Image (tube, grey):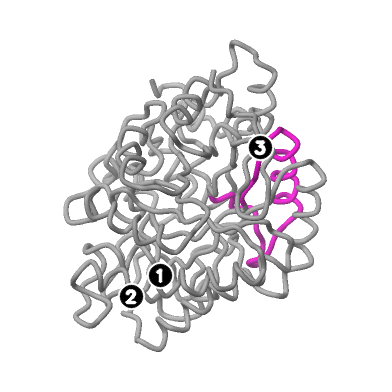
Amino acid sequence: MNPNLFTPYKLGHVTLRNRTIRSAAFESMGHRFGPTEQLRQYHVSVARGGIGMTTLAYAAVSRSGLSFDKQLWLRDAIVPELHDITDAIHAEGAAAGIQIGHCGNMTHLSTAGQIPIGASTGFNLYAYTPVRGMRAKEIAAVAKDFGRAVHTAHAAGFDSVEVHAGHGYLISQFLSPYTNRRRDEFGGSLDNRMRFMRMCLGEVMEAAAQTGTAVLVKHNMYDGFRGGIEIPESIEIAREIERFGVDGIVLTGGFVSKAPMAVMRGLIPLYTMSHYSSWWLRPFIRWFGPYMIEQFPFEECYFLEDAKKFRTALKGPLVYVGGLVSREGIDKALDAGFELVQMARALVNDPAFVNKLKEGDAATRSACDHRNYCIARMYSVDMKCCKHCDDLPRKIREELAQLP
């Protein structure tokens, strides 16, 4: 067993009690763009369960960056409620992080309060909405929103922020040639496509220096389809991120609007997905889902071999995420030279998973079977494991039982 797992790690100005982080997987536990008691209880349970740091997911830096009404909009009005959460997390011995980002074209007029904006004008089939390409003044304003979000997070008691630069959200939309068709200084060459990311990170790092906040960046190793970012170009982007002096890069992959299962892997419960979707989407998902959603089989540490290429190319701290469900898998990532590991579904299944690892039970392996019920209901209800639901509809129970 790797002896580093339960040794402290200094992340910026905060010391984590071990090398584990609850990754920023969307909880869908907000209300009117603010936190709830359910969100508080969940993260406190993960902190009590032994995690080094737990991360509140997917907080928008501005109203235009919101995808869902159950998502956090990081603003002064919710600081007292967020501080109540961070105080409770700290009381359990864990650090508190929050992911900050902007969804770009992954939203609707009713949620964002305006026509969705992105790197380029077009139509987002995933969100079924027209999208307007951002103007230069808007680009500069959103970059400043990222810096303000760091100050807000600090005021709310967070030790760390994680800048979301992957998965096809706004920073990723500028980086990827698939979504960036601009002909100005923000499009075309890789250097131009990185310009918006550099603006955001410049604002973030300035604010972090003023507040003592640790900074992680979530970065796509690849988009997961032809025409998107591939590993060689992604390594160059990662080197640019590293030059900003961030405290760690979280290596991920996939584009939620094009290759969503490249992010999460595992089985696709199509009936369950349609059940928790809008009524007008249900038949579309059931009939066309098998042709539109590419399946990526789950295996433990599914990003590790690609992530090792980044470990070889980069000098700074790296965080491994992707398919960690056992002590064996975690040790494999740490042995490969990653300073920290992130996981989510193992902790949705059992918030005390890390404590059980520490107790050294030889049988300690997450009971998560990656049938992805939690993903199917995540955006409409909350992120909850099917093994904790006593009231599942009969057809959902039948579908889940039939999945291999």
Quadrant where the image shows the N terminus: top right
Depth check, front residue: 362 or 168: 362
For the residues labelled 1 and 3, the Cα–Cα distance comes to 36 Å
Residue 269 lies in quadrant: top left
275 lies above or below 245:
above
**What residue does disc 3 label?**
8
**What residue does disc 1 label?**
104
- Where is residue 144 drawn, in percent x and y? 51, 79
What amino acid type should be assigned to the residue bearing mark 3? Pro
Left or right position of 31 against 345: right
Q: Which residues are magenta?
A: 26-55
Whether pointer 1 and pointer 2 mark residues with C-beta atoms closer than 8 Å, the reply is yes
Q: Residue at x 17, y 56 (%)?
A: 227
Q: Nearer the viewer, mark 1 or mark 3?
A: 3
Q: Which disc is residue 96 wearing?
A: none
- Where is residue 213 drawn, in percent x and y? 63, 62
